[in-house]
Image (cartoon, rainbow, N blue to C red):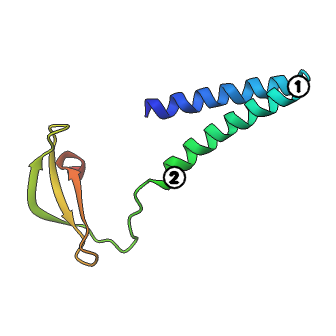
Amino acid sequence: MRLRTAILALSALVALVGAGQLLWGRGASGAELLALGALGILGTVFERWRYRKHLPPSARWEPTAERFEDPATGEVMEVLYDPVSGERRYEPVNRRAS
């Protein structure tokens, strides 16, 4: 999340500098910076939208008896199963209890 925020902030800064240069009459370099900043913003926003997980609206997640400790976070994870698609999903146990 921090890297995404940093890229958005840097891209916005580059776009603002480019817009400022356009206003001060430095057309070519200002247009390039404005385009580069806009490209950075759009690319970062699109990446977030493109790669998020889409869950089917008909998914009916059923808990299974499987639980394990996630080695990366140390949290106890529960396995959920959708009998229609056969897809499995893993969620922290404390999130399921809420």
First in sequence: mark 2 vs mark 1: 1
List the residue tagged with mark 1. 23
Judged left or right of residue 53, residue 6 is: right
State the SS at label 1. helix
Residue 51 lies, with reference to residue 24, above or below; the image says below
Point out residue 57 in the picture as x, y percentages from the top left corner.
40, 71
Judged left or right of residue 37, residue 28 is: right
Q: Which mark is residue 69?
A: none
> Amino acid under label 1?
Leu
Point out residue 23 in the picture as x, y percentages from the top left corner.
88, 25
> Amino acid under label 2?
Trp
Q: In what quadrant of the picture does the N terminus appear?
A: top left
Point out residue 5 in the picture as x, y percentages from the top left corner.
51, 31
Residue 56 lies, with reference to residue 42, above or below; the image says below
Q: Say which quarter of the image contains residue 61.
A: bottom left
Judged from this view, the residue extending furthest toward the bottom is 84
Point out residue 18 in the picture as x, y percentages from the top left corner.
77, 27
Identify the residue at image location x=51%, y=52%: 49
Identify the residue at image location x=81%, y=23%: 20
Marks 2 and 1, how far apart at CA: 32 Å
Q: Say which quarter of the image contains residue 37.
A: top right
Q: Which mark is residue 49?
A: 2
